[in-house]
Image (cartoon, rainbow, N blue to C red):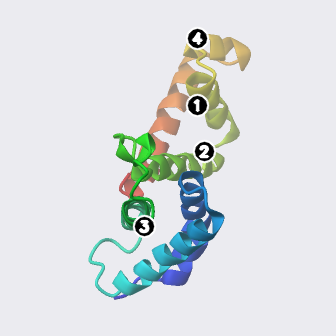
Amino acid sequence: MPLDCEKIWIEYKDRVSGYIFSHISNSDDAEDLVSSVFAKIIQYSFSYRGDPNSVSSFVYRITQNLVIDYYRTKKPQDELPDSLVAAQSIEDDFFKQSTLDFLADALALLPEFERDIIILHYYKNISLKKITIKLQSTEGKVKLAHTRAIKFLKHKFKELDF
């Protein structure tokens, strides 16, 4: 079954464009590369054998390969930027952004008390004991809410094979 290319376009066009424009200084070439990425996605959409709900690696690999090919063919005198050569690949960058987007959505589904605990503990680095005082609650209630929230978030991430 072919991939839903329109859905891929909607979901990834901004990220793909941002990545390409950050690596290619010539805006005309960058626009051509963005178009080429989605042309390749369409070309390979019928032979894609992975999970249709998890195409990010597929999109990121095509994007990264086309940017590398650009430097090999159009700019043979230029060296590849360190960001393309380094272990921190486009797939890692996009995966991190996708993970953060998904985490924000999952946090929004939590009850306010549990969401506050997760944000205070993991983003503001406040201990559960101090959170108990800040939220005027008991330590047992805060720990239980923390455990429930973590369990819920793990479940949400498992649903998407993160």
Q: Position of residue 13 (x, y in %)?
A: 59, 68
Cα distance between the residues tagged 1 and 3: 31 Å
Q: Quadrant of the N terminus?
A: bottom left
**Residue 134 falls in which quadrant of the image?**
top right
Residue holding disc 3:
59
Q: Which mark is residue 118?
A: 1
Query: Which label sits in the foreground, 3 or 2?
Result: 3
Query: Residue at (40%, 47%) from the top-left corner?
Result: 79
Mark in front: 4 vs 2: 2
Q: Earlier in the sequence, mark 2 or mark 1?
A: 2
> Looking at this view, is 161 or 20 the one in front?
20
**Pointers 2 and 1 in contact (CB under 8 A)?**
yes
Label 1 residue SS: helix
Q: CA distance from mark 4 to mark 3?
A: 44 Å
Determine if residue 2 is in view. yes
- Nearer to us: label 1 or label 4: 1
Q: Residue at x 41, y 70 (%)?
A: 53
Mark with earlier residue (3, 2): 3
- Nearer mark to the viewer, of 1 and 3: 3
Task: Give the amino acid at mark 1.
Answer: Ile
Residue type (three-letter) at the residue carrying disc 3: Val
Q: CA distance from mark 2 to mark 1?
A: 8 Å
User: What's the distance in space between the residues labelled 4 and 2, CA to CA?
Assistant: 21 Å
Amino acid beneath label 4: Lys
- The residue at which mark 4 appears reads as 129
Disc 3 from disc 2: Cα separation: 26 Å
Q: CA distance from mark 1 to mark 4?
A: 13 Å
Earlier residue among tags 4 and 3: 3
